[in-house]
Image (cartoon, coloured by chain):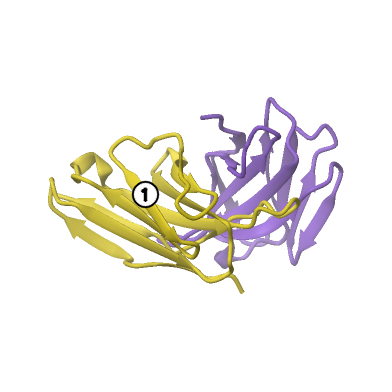
Chain colours: A yellow, B purple
């Protein structure tokens, strides 16, 4: 079974703090993704990575950065958290092989910025 | 970014009823995926479709890849309380570069 784990299920941070969200997958997937999910807005892609040290911006990268130093780990960084970054954050991973487009998700991190 | 048109937005149904939801796109897709999300959890893959016309079942769930490659539907037969949740469609087209394009979700609520 594919397993994607996220470092925290719930986080509460103060405005201006630097926040790290960690994601680890154990299936040797090449691709990893960070989404945020807000009521009524569905899943929006923040960043994704198709290889170690490679990253590409998604639809809403502003205010976020990412790091992928190892294949199995993809980190999302909020350099200076703001209240409008309160959200559910979801990490996912997938293979690059043709006919293998399924993404597998972690349980999510619900971040509250006060 | 591009979004799929997923409908209905929400459904109130009685236990035992059949459910149908669908997604449409303005462009041709190579892949259609259906996910379910329980409250407070990440989405879980239900069914993956890779060929136009393909019809695939997973227990009480059946999904089809539309013959035009621009739509897909998901049916749930004889709904039960644990079917409650949000169902998402997602797809890939030639320009997607490993990314998925997502529908806004269909929220399924079972009337007591």
Q: Secondary structure at mark 1?
A: strand
Q: Nearer the viewer, residue A40 or A18?
A: A18
The picture places residue B104, in percent across and down from the top left corner, at: 52, 39
Q: Is residue B73 left or right of residue A19?
A: right
For residue B18, what is the image quadrant?
bottom right
| Residue at point 43%, 55% (across, down) | A90
Where does label 1 land, which residue?
Answer: A66
Disc 1 crowd, CA 10 A, few/some/many (<14, 14-19, 20+): many
For residue A10, what is the image quadrant?
bottom left
The picture places residue B23, in percent across and down from the top left corner, at: 67, 38
Q: Is residue A67 left or right of residue B46?
A: left
Q: Is residue B111 left or right of residue B29?
A: left
Q: Nearer the viewer, residue A50 or A37?
A: A50
Quarter of the figure with the N terminus of chain A: bottom right
The picture places residue B27, in percent across and down from the top left corner, at: 70, 27
- Parent chain of label 1: A
């Amino acid at each position: 079974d594919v397993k994607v784990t996220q470092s925290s299920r719930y986080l509460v941070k103060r405005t201006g703090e630097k926040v790290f969200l960690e994601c680890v997958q154990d299936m040797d997937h090449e691709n990893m993704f960070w989404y945020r999910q807000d009521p009524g807005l569905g899943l929006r892609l923040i960043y994704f990575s198709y290889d170690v040290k490679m990253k590409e911006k998604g639809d809403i990268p502003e205010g976020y950065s990412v790091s992928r130093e190892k294949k199995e780990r993809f980190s999302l960084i909020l350099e200076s958290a703001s209240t409008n970054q309160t959200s559910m954050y979801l990490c996912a991973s997938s293979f690059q092989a043709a006919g293998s487009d399924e993404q597998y998700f972690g349980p999510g991190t619900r971040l509250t910025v006060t | 970014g591009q979004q799929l048109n997923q409908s209905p937005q929400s459904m109130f149904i009685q236990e035992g009823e059949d459910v149908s939801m669908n997604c449409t796109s303005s462009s041709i897709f190579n892949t259609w995926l259906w996910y379910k999300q329980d409250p407070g959890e990440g989405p879980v893959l239900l069914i993956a479709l890779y060929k136009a016309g393909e019809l695939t079942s997973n227990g009480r769930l059946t999904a089809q890849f539309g013959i035009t490659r621009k739509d897909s539907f998901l049916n749930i037969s004889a709904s039960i309380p644990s079917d409650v949740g949000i169902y998402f469609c997602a797809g890939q087209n030639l320009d997607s570069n490993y990314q998925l394009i997502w529908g806004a979700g269909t929220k399924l609520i079972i009337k007591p």
